[in-house]
Amino acid sequence: MTAASPPELLRAPLVVEFPFTRSLGPVQSAFLTGLREGVVLGVKTAGGKVMVPPVEYDPVTAEEIRELVEVAATGTVTTWAWNHLPRPHQPLDTPFAWVLVKLDGADTALLHALDAPGPEAVHTGMRVRVRWAAERTGAITDIACFEPYEGPAGAEAAPHDGDFAGAVTGIVAQARLDYVYSPGRAQTAYINALSEQKTVGERCPSCHKVYVPPRGACPTCGVATTDQVEVGPAGTVTTYCIVNIKARNLDIEVPYVYAHIALDGAGLALHGRIGGIPYDQVRMGLRVEPVWTEGGRYPDHYRPTGEPDADYDAYKELI
């Protein structure tokens, strides 16, 4: 008798990306434009504290802060952590230290990278200076990194009007997370069932709620869910939204409808796109069924079944 081989470990690379455009107020505009010009600016609070990076409101009193000051490009490391394996798009592509640096003239610390040969070369209290990027555009990356420094301390904070030609008034923040996802037992069973055009959830042995997709445990009762239950395929639209903005890399014409759908037998709703009907005819209580594409591992969308709408009392607890 031979032992059964372990199930295949599912893994998939995933990217969560949300680049967004934001406008800058006068304080942040002056700070980033100053970096472009090789000047580090902070703000002085009513209590005389110099904050770098600058903020627009006093964190203690909540008063608006507008008094700009220039601080030195040299400073002292207040704390640090060694990064032995830099990730893509980090400041340096060789091992470096993340450091908090209190610039000369400032009372708060700025987080950035320190270029050092190894962790033995870094210590709290060491003196450093800004290494400016070769090309500067008005972003925090205009500071390429910090580097060790043994020269004299910089001057005290001095008033600055924050007036620069061609001020930076907006930025695009590139928020991105790359990771590898590996589902557990419950989600693996769910994914494998989808490849057979089935939707399988798991029932809590205590409250008897059927979770789709399954989570492996009931979040309410705190017990494992091992009883698999096939639900659907049809379901009911419980609520929905109309999407009017086309997403990048998504070949779907707008407007379209994204809905929460309570599959028959499920204890909560999952989400899916509604097709086969004009977007302005989608409604709560609409009965729908999945549409699978050739070779698809999940429903492409849901379409009306032609049945009468479900009564509100039948799905109100699933909204």
Image: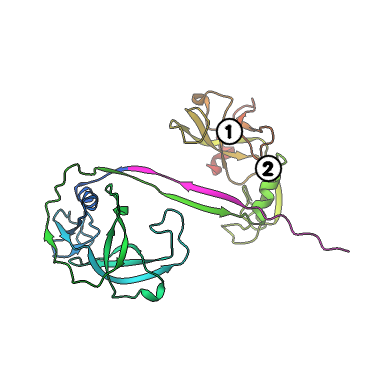
Question: Which residue position is annotated with label 1?
Answer: 311
In percent of width and height, residue 135 lies at: 29, 49
Between the residue at mark 2 and the residue at mark 1, the CA separation in whole angstroms equals 28 Å
Residue 64 is situated, as x and y percent measured from the top left of the image, at 17, 54
Magenta region, residue range:
1-21
Q: From the image, state whether disc 2 or disc 1 is nearer to you.
A: 2
Residue at (57%, 30%) from the top-left corner?
A: 286
Q: Residues within 10 Å of mark 2 (few under 14, many from 20)?
A: some
Q: Identify the residue position indicated by label 2 in the image.
A: 194
Label the magenta part by its dominant secondary structure.
Answer: loop
Q: Residue furthest right?
A: 1
* Disc assigned to residue 207: none
Q: In terms of image quadrants, where is residue 46?
A: bottom left
Frontmost residue, 13 versus 204: 13
Within 10 Å of disc 1 (Cα), the crowding (few <14, some 14-19, many 20+) is: few
Residue 178 in percent (x, y) is at 50, 52
**Which element carries disc 1, helix, strand or loop?**
loop
Tag 2's secondary structure?
helix
User: From this viewpoint, is residue 190 visible?
Assistant: yes
Left or right: 180 with respect to 7? left
Q: Earlier in the sequence, mark 2 or mark 1?
A: 2
Residue 94 vs 36, above or below: the answer is below
Q: Residue at x 75, y 59 (%)?
A: 6
Residue type at numbered disc 1? Asp
Q: Can residue 11 be found in the magenta stretch? A: yes
Q: Who's the residue at 32% across and 53% down the image? A: 141
